[in-house]
Image: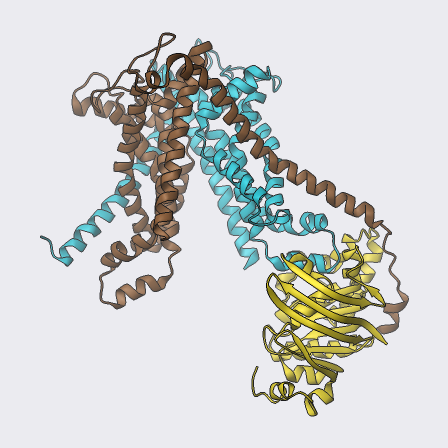
Amino acid sequence: MDSAMTTNTLKLPEKATKKRDWIETVFHLLFLGCAMVGVLSVATIAWFVFHEGLPAFQQAGISEIIFGREWLPPALFGIAPMIVASLISTLGAVIIGVPIAILTAVFLAELAPKWLANLVRPAVELLAGIPSVVYGFFGLVIIVPMIEVLFHIPAGNTILAGIIVLAIMILPTVITISETSLRALPSTYKEAALALGASHIYSIFRVLIPAARSGIYTGISLGVARAIGETMAIIMVMGNAPAMPGSLLEPARTLTANIAMEMSYATGIHASALYSTGIVLLVFIVLLNASLLYLNHKRSH
Amino acid sequence: MNKLTINNLDLFYGENHALKDISLNIPNRKVTALIGPSGCGKSTLLRTLNRMNDLVENVKITGDVHFDGEDIYQQSDVKALRKRVGMVFQKANPFPMSIFENVAFGLKAQGVKSTEEIKAVVEESLRSAALWDEVKDRLDSDAFGLSGGQQQRLCIARAIAMEPEVILMDEPTSALDPIATHKIEELMDELRKKFTIVIVTHSMNQAKRIADKTAFFWMGELVEHGETDQIFNNPIDTRTQGYVSGEFG
Amino acid sequence: MLNRTQQDKVLLGAIWASASITILFLLWVMWHILSNGLSHVSWEFITGAYTRIGEASGIWAMIVSTVYMVGLSLSIAAPIGIMTAIYLTEYAKPGSKIVKVIRFCTESLAGIPSIVYGLFGMTFFVTTLGLGFSILAGSLTLSMLILPVIIRTTEEALMAVPISYREGGYALGATKIYTIWRLILPSAMPGIITSIILSIGRVIGESAPVFLTAGMVTQIPESVLESGRTLTVHLYKLTQELFTQSEWDQAYATATILIVLVLALNLATKIITNRYNKVSH
């Protein structure tokens, strides 16, 4: 074997090192350029939203917009009812949806027989992928009439309908992420608790859920983001009246719905006011992420 | 005749002084074993010889390494260097492709186009790595289907295909069973006729069996080096004595 | 007060009740739509034309618009997203300032509600750039929306490629770009394909940013500069006017098609991940 190796001098094509280095540099710059697209996109969106939204704040006044209760473009641009509607519907969805979701996650991670978990898990993932208009449609044909019957009201397009639809919609997000973080816990946690004579249920609630807290917080915050940002399903079931709702059984218009319903024909200061609505929505998202950071930060100390 | 000459080499990982003033000659077409307890710097030294340490952040190297009289750290073409200095890793790392494609990878990366030429080199490399007879009927099957020992010989074949002058081996048998280890050691005995081999090993018996020269490292220092017989039978330094007699390490 | 055992029983009951509610709603949503919709899905419905007056109710134009939207959004976002992920995992120094900026920006993109994309897309692409309500304006908007999904999933796939492959490649003297192209990308391919399927789902599912940028014309768009109505927007418009039985049937059938599409995408992801796991273990 040995003489063959020395005589077979393989002719490697002579590629000048310089050319190769040049190609490397070109690709490096190409990849960097692509990475900048995301940065540029955020910058452009931020600039546009604020540039377009500020005139309304300047002309109508910040407090008149945020605390104003009348939305009568092009005269009055009070979005307080929309802020209230967005907050109430999201809060309601969280109060109903989050406990159910976390307990379902516990069920899948700890209690369900394997065959059942393997059946439910993909179904929950499927539920996460279903378009929001389909949920809105379901809400419109099932939830809305049900509310009409149950509460004897003429129109079931109410905040309550929105809350129920949103609660269903945030289930998959919260379930999937909570379950993943519960499963990621080292089995020693549970073993240690059980070895101390704690019951399975007790160790779940006292050891596992607290240990998986940060993942559960993330799941909840994604659920909240989905609820507060949801547009179409809400438009389809909540009635969209831009007035301050007096109860859960009245129609209301969320911030997102306000934008979606009027953007296609708004001009001038009216369009700017819709951008202001978008700014308020973004502020809520920022606050949400900040509180998630705070919660997870507090935990690590 | 020395293939590689290491002069006053110091290496830092950030603050950590990992190699301290190493000077060592690696003779041509011989097997040189680097031994010593874990963390002594033997693998780090191996990785300076083909500049694999370039991939690590915050590495600072002073001193020089001459390869056929040329300072490898003055040379800008690392790829050309790595073509001449092949490497086999601790854990066999076949690529997720067929056996044939694994061996052909380096050639194709160099821009070799001729199918005939590639086929010839693949066959020859697999023969040199004593793997040909075992795989010639399934060259197109997935490399992960091979046993651990076969995978490691495939990685050796992959290195040989580049016709390197030096082959660096970083504990190549540490993940293998005794039979597979024996096969690789036999193979190395063949390979030394053609290649300069530098092997890092934690097994003193392996060093005794296969190495012509042995160098003992201790906490980043090169304590002692020389003929393998001398290092194991008449060590000069007490630390070498302690290590080869199995007192510590 | 309840003692420990009683408390355990209450909590256990709550867990079972919650799981049952989840499963019940899940089955309810699916069953309600599929049972009312499947019988109205016909070849004619899928491939037929649509007129507003109601003599033709096919959704072919919406399917074509949806396909255009998916194809165009992905051909914009996928290359950019994949190359961004390559930059982040293979080129940038981990933890460096530029990585932090890029990460922050992609995370922000992921956090922006889709309606704000619609708002922006309408002002920027439709009006400022003068693209009008068009498939192109819609796709540009949606490509920004799916960019973070592609970046993050591709990054995870690239990071899962063992370091030993990179070392092996470089040790053979291969260039960085060759190693990436021939070794790292093929190894990460299942993950990258998953990220693309996820994005397809996102594009199909979006509606608010779509009708604000691509409009809702029910004709087959002849070029990307024409408006088109996607399936989700179509379902929304149908639900605005549910008067006749035929309109109900159309809405259920369209919702059924959407669910079947999502089901198919989920199955595709499962098949890819299963096959990949089999190969690597």
- Give how far across and how far down residue A147 sits, in percent: 22, 24
Observer able to see residue A112: no
Q: Nearer the viewer, residue C194 or C267?
A: C194
Using residue B159 as the reference point, say whether residue B19 is left or right of it. Answer: left
Chain letter of the yellow region:
B
Note whether A283 is above or below C15 in the view shown.
above
Q: Nearer the viewer, residue C30 or A64?
A: A64
Note whether A83 is above or below A180 in the view shown.
above
| Point 44% across, 23% down: residue | C208
Q: Colour of chain A?
A: brown
**Residue A225, quarter of the rendered image:** top left
| Point 69% across, 89% down: residue | B236
**Residue C162, quarter of the rendered image:** bottom right
- Give how far across and how far down residue C173 sits, in percent: 75, 57
Q: State the quadrant of the C terminus of chain B.
A: bottom right
- Give how far across and how far down residue A173 sits, in percent: 38, 40
Chain letter of the cyan region:
C
